[in-house]
Structure formats: C-alpha cells, structure tokens
Image (cartoon, grey):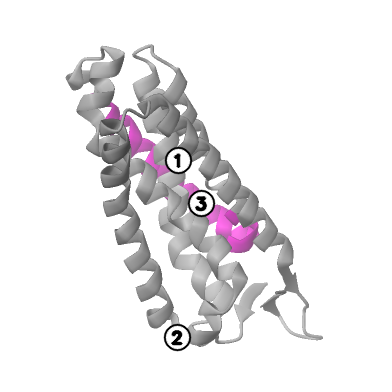
Amino acid sequence: MRTVARDWTLSEVLRDPNFYLISMGVLAPPFVATTIFFHQVYLTELRGWPLTLFAAGFAVMSIANVTFTLFSGWLIDRLSAARVLPMFLLPLAAASFVAAFVTAPWAIFAFMALMGVSNGFSSTLSGAMWPELYGTRHLGAIRSVVVATMVFASAAGPGLTGYLIDAGVDYDLQLAAMGVYALVAAAGMWVVSRRIVRKPEPGSDHVPLTLRR
C-alpha cells in the first residue's frame, strides 16, 4: 500500500506546528556533524588522540553512511517515512554522548559509525518524508525552506560552539548538550509520527495521509 497526502501549500506548511517539530530534528545532523568536524583539531588535542587516527574514522563513517542509506530506503518502503522518523536521531544522540564522555581512542570509530548511521537515515528520509507528509505539488518550495535552514544550521554550529569555547564553556558539556537536543528532537519526531492518521479508502490501494494539528 502506498501513502499519499494532499498537496499542502508552503503557507499552510509554515502554519503547521508539526513542520517545526520535524525541522527541529532535521537540523540536528548538520549542526552536530559540522560542529564536530570543524573543531576536530580541538577535540583531538583535548583527548590526546592522533589527528591521523581521527581522519581514519571518516572511512568508518562513510561505510556506515552508505550501508544505512540503503537499509533505510528498504525500511521506509516497508514501514513508511513517518514510522521511521522517530528513530533516525537516536544514533546521533549516542554519537554525541560518546564524543563527550569517552576518552579512549576507540571512541573515534564509535561516534563516527553512529554518525554515519544517522546521516544514512537522514539522507533517505529527506527525500521520502516531505512528499509523504505534505504532497508533491509544492514540494520544491517546501524543500527550499528546509534546505536553507539546514545550511544555516551547518554554518551556525561551528560559530556558536567556537564562541562558547572562547567564553570558557566546557566542550564536553557542549557535546553532551547536543546529545540531549537530539533526544528531545527524537521525542518530537515520535509525537509527529503518532499524530499521523491513515485511513484506507474502500477498494483502493492508496492510503490518504493527514496530520492532526
């Protein structure tokens, strides 16, 4: 059975509280990942890790990213993007907590793998989620807003954390706060997922999808 939605206009989407709960989660991966990568030298100096070992972790992240991009596509086809939505930030939260609290060198590969899992899910969800929830007619306008905010989050992360580092705020505390944010955003995703109502049309293989406000 396929899930379809009525075609929301951009103005309707921007008035929908669910859109902001979803955006809260969508912005987490670019914010967290860009921040950690931008401050990788600072993190390795704090931990006493060789920078070359950190660089090797990118291979692990790439493997996890590709693997879970493919897996999440299969999972979305079976369950729908709405059902997968609550789980894609959990690996990112775990990655943030590992980066914050684990000082052993193996932590590099652990949080890189976890970020790869979350990014793999995110890249597939970003294509499947919006048309499933809001239709396709105004998809370009909706995605333009989403992508613009993601770019802003990617730029804001390193700048904000850099300012806080200069202000004396412990970097480990900042990483832990990112993990907490990812968990809170995952809870928001769960709320949105629960609000989605599917009512099959008699004699049809289509499943109209609406969002309860």
Secondary structure of the residue carrying numbered label 3: helix
Give whichever of discs 2 and 1 has the lower sequence position: 1
For discs 2 and 1, the disc positioned in front in the rendered view: 2
Q: Amino acid at mark 1?
A: Val
Q: Look at the image and give the residue range highlighted in magenta.
A: 56-85
Q: Quadrant of residue 57?
A: top left
- Which residue position is annotated with label 1? 117
Q: Residue at x 51, y 54 (%)?
A: 25
Q: Measured along the vertical axis of the image, is residue 187 above or below residue 161? A: below
Q: Residue at x 55, y 87 (%)?
A: 7
Q: Can the viewer see residue 176?
A: yes
- Which residue position is annotated with label 3? 72
Give the side of residue 43 with respect to residue 117, left or right. Answer: left
**Label 1 – label 3 distance at C-alpha:** 9 Å
Q: Can the viewer see residue 55?
A: no
- Which residue position is annotated with label 2? 138
Q: Nearer the viewer, residue 164 or 45?
A: 164
> What is the magenta segment's predominant secondary structure?
helix
Give whichever of discs 3 and 2 has the lower sequence position: 3
Neighbourhood count class around disc 3 (C-alpha, 10 Å): few under 14, some 14–19, many 20 upward: many
Secondary structure of the residue carrying numbered label 1: helix
Magenta-colored stretch includes residue 139: no
Q: Position of residue 27 (x, y in %)?
A: 43, 55
Q: Measured along the vertical axis of the image, is residue 38 above or below residue 109? A: below
Q: Residue at x 72, y 74 (%)?
A: 212
